[in-house]
Amino acid sequence: METARRGLFEPGPGIGAGLRDLPANINLKTGSAGLVAAIFGCSGPALIVIGAAGAGKLSEGQTVAWLLAIYGLGGLISFVMGLYYKMPITGAYSIPGAALVAGSLATFPFDQAVGAFVMAGVLVLILGVTGLIGKLMRWLPMPIVMAMIAGALIRFGIGAVNAVSALPIVVGAAVVAFFLSMRFLKVVPPVLSALVVGLVAVAFTGSFGTNEAGISFVLPELTAPSFTIDAFLAIAVPLAILVVGAENAQATGVLMAEKYPAPVNAMTIISGIGGILAGFLGGHNANIAGPMTAICSSDQAGERREGRYAATVINGVLFAGFGVFAGAVVPLILMLPGPLIGAVAGLAMINVLVMAFQSAFSKPAGYQIGAFVALIVAMSNVSILGISAPFWALLFGAVVSMLVEKPVEGIDGGGAAIGAREPA
């Protein structure tokens, strides 16, 4: 983490090095992980954004502009960050942020909401430029961060189980294929086997949906931003906290769990820039994404950690393409059954969750009580003052640990400033 003190951006190998080594790292595993992450991000979450646009009575052109902003810029973030750092740092947007905006559009006209989108990006950029986020992540104990990750992502594992009851034949076949492939087909990524078998089962059972997005292929319609104090307080501040306290925090924890030196400052700054640009295009933000970073950084993207960034680059290309052709592609993507998409995403995160739990509760690491508090708060999915659970999980976990666990010398808890703790 010392690199964060040398400048605004932590140094990386560079885009040239990433491009040079990219062909050697594109293979079946990185390709399948990137594809699964893209399908996950371009299916259900797209419907949430479209629903928010409907709640605000946006025109078709404004809806297409919103999708172009968050998917196009989210894909660009993946491409730039993945290549520059040669890490699976994956861009997208905040799904809880879309839900927040959906509620706000009942009160605020869209031009004021767009102004708030831009201001949220400015707030995130300030946090990155000042280095405050980097300092915070150096201070936070690693077990508490990992417990937050486990609690925030466990819903995907639970969702995979629930998906079996929702669509037994299709999802059951996908799950069986995943574990059989893990055991017997070492050259084929289990997540790809699950997706292919699931799609075959969908075809045989006629389970394709008939979802219609309600938009056609039209040109984007830009909306001039209007800046107001009310929208700043009601939309910009909560949205900025969601980006930093939920999405970026999850992505940082996932990368740390996979032994990557996460460039926290750069991730925050690029999320701020993405938020500003997306706002001017009419989208609520473009930032580093937690769940898709988890998919692209897991061992499902290959045994070689140094090559997994190719999954993020592939995901970025697919994401950006989805944004450009959103009006035509959304109805097709939404024909895939939701339970299958949720199950495949959950299966892809199994090892991420295992490592998060191990890092959070391994005895030498300490912080057992604080980590447990962080875990259950993140699992609760509680929202306080419009701020989602991952932020409160980190806060409450750290506070409880400071109150009831005394430091243990000689063991680094994950932050640079404090060591492990044991119950007082």
Image: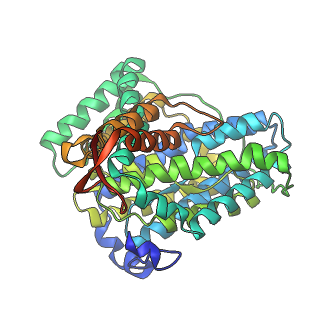
Q: Residue at x 57, y 65 (%)?
A: 128
Query: Looking at the picture, how far across and down is residue 283, in whole percent?
Result: 70, 52
Position of the C terminus, as image quadrant, is top left
Left or right side of 266 for 221: right
Q: Residue at x 47, y 42 (%)?
A: 40
Q: Residue at x 34, y 52 (%)?
A: 142
Q: Spot the residue most to the front.
A: 424
Left or right side of 423 for 246: right
Q: Residue at x 29, y 71 (%)?
A: 24
Query: Looking at the picture, how far across and down is residue 215, in whole percent?
Result: 72, 41
- Image label count: 0
Residue 411's quadrant in the figure?
Answer: bottom left
Query: Looking at the picture, how far across and down is residue 140, in whole percent?
Result: 41, 53
Position of the N terminus, as image quadrant, is bottom left
Left or right side of 259 for 140: right
Residue 286's quadrant in the figure?
Answer: bottom right
Q: Is residue 208 positioned above or below 89 on the image?
A: above
Q: Nearer the viewer, residue 307 or 229?
A: 229
Q: Nearer the viewer, residue 117 or 238?
A: 238
Looking at the image, can residue 244 be seen? Answer: yes
